[in-house]
Protein backbone atom coordinates (compact mmCIF):
# COMPACT_ATOMS: atom_id res chain seq x y z
CA UNK A 1 0.00 0.00 0.00
CA UNK A 2 1.33 3.39 -0.93
CA UNK A 3 2.07 5.49 2.15
CA UNK A 4 0.18 8.51 0.80
CA UNK A 5 -2.97 6.43 0.44
CA UNK A 6 -2.49 5.17 3.99
CA UNK A 7 -2.29 8.77 5.24
CA UNK A 8 -5.40 9.78 3.32
CA UNK A 9 -7.34 6.79 4.65
CA UNK A 10 -6.22 7.53 8.22
CA UNK A 11 -7.29 11.16 8.05
CA UNK A 12 -10.60 10.23 6.42
CA UNK A 13 -11.32 7.72 9.21
CA UNK A 14 -10.45 10.32 11.84
CA UNK A 15 -12.62 13.07 10.36
CA UNK A 16 -15.61 10.85 9.59
CA UNK A 17 -15.62 9.12 12.96
CA UNK A 18 -15.13 12.39 14.84
CA UNK A 19 -18.15 13.83 13.04
CA UNK A 20 -20.23 10.79 14.02
CA UNK A 21 -19.08 10.40 17.65
CA UNK A 22 -22.37 11.68 19.07
CA UNK A 23 -24.36 8.96 17.28
CA UNK A 24 -22.77 5.91 18.87
CA UNK A 25 -19.78 5.06 21.11
CA UNK A 26 -18.35 2.78 18.42
CA UNK A 27 -17.28 5.89 16.50
CA UNK A 28 -15.07 6.93 19.43
CA UNK A 29 -13.07 3.71 19.18
CA UNK A 30 -12.94 4.05 15.40
CA UNK A 31 -11.53 7.55 15.92
CA UNK A 32 -8.90 6.08 18.26
CA UNK A 33 -7.99 3.54 15.60
CA UNK A 34 -7.77 6.26 12.97
CA UNK A 35 -5.41 8.21 15.21
CA UNK A 36 -3.27 5.11 15.70
CA UNK A 37 -3.21 4.58 11.94
CA UNK A 38 -2.19 8.21 11.45
CA UNK A 39 0.61 7.73 14.01
CA UNK A 40 1.80 4.68 12.07
CA UNK A 41 1.73 6.69 8.85
CA UNK A 42 3.73 9.46 10.53
CA UNK A 43 6.27 6.87 11.64
CA UNK A 44 6.58 5.56 8.09
CA UNK A 45 7.33 9.04 6.76
CA UNK A 46 9.68 9.79 9.68
CA UNK A 47 7.54 12.62 11.06
CA UNK A 48 8.18 11.90 14.73
CA UNK A 49 6.41 14.94 16.22
CA UNK A 50 3.23 13.70 14.55
CA UNK A 51 3.88 10.17 15.79
CA UNK A 52 3.81 11.56 19.32
CA UNK A 53 0.81 13.83 18.73
CA UNK A 54 -1.33 11.19 17.03
CA UNK A 55 -0.25 8.58 19.55
CA UNK A 56 -1.44 10.82 22.38
CA UNK A 57 -4.75 11.46 20.58
CA UNK A 58 -5.18 7.72 20.15
CA UNK A 59 -4.71 7.08 23.87
CA UNK A 60 -7.02 9.97 24.83
CA UNK A 61 -9.73 8.71 22.46
CA UNK A 62 -9.36 5.15 23.75
CA UNK A 63 -9.77 6.33 27.35
CA UNK A 64 -12.78 8.42 26.31
CA UNK A 65 -14.30 5.33 24.68
CA UNK A 66 -13.87 3.41 27.94
CA UNK A 67 -15.61 6.25 29.80
CA UNK A 68 -18.44 6.48 27.27
CA UNK A 69 -19.03 2.73 27.54
CA UNK A 70 -19.48 3.11 31.28
CA UNK A 71 -16.07 1.79 32.32
CA UNK A 72 -13.85 3.23 35.01
Image (cartoon, grey):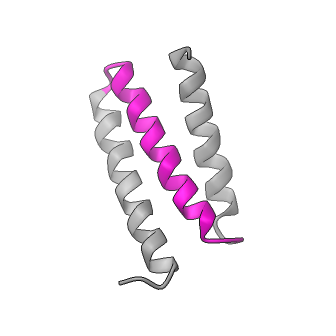
**Spot occupied by residue 37 in the image (x, y as percentages of width and height):** 47, 38
Quadrant holding the N terminus: top right
Q: Is residue 67 magenta?
A: no
Above or below for 71 versus 38? below
Above or below for 48 versus 29? above
Residue at (44%, 79%) from the top-left corner? 67
Above or below for 48 versus 2? below
**Spot occupied by residue 9 in the image (x, y as percentages of width and height):** 61, 32
Residue at (31%, 20%) from the top-left corner? 46
Above or below for 60 versus 68? above
Q: Main secondary structure of the magenta part?
A: helix
**Spot occupied by residue 19 in the image (x, y as percentages of width and height):** 68, 58
Q: Is residue 40 magenta?
A: yes
Which residues are drawn in magenta? 23-47
Residue at (39%, 32%) from the top-left corner? 40
Q: Residue 24 lies in what quarter of the image? A: bottom right
Amino acid sequence: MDTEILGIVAVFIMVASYALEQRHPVFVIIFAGGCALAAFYAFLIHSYPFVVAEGIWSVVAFRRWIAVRGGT
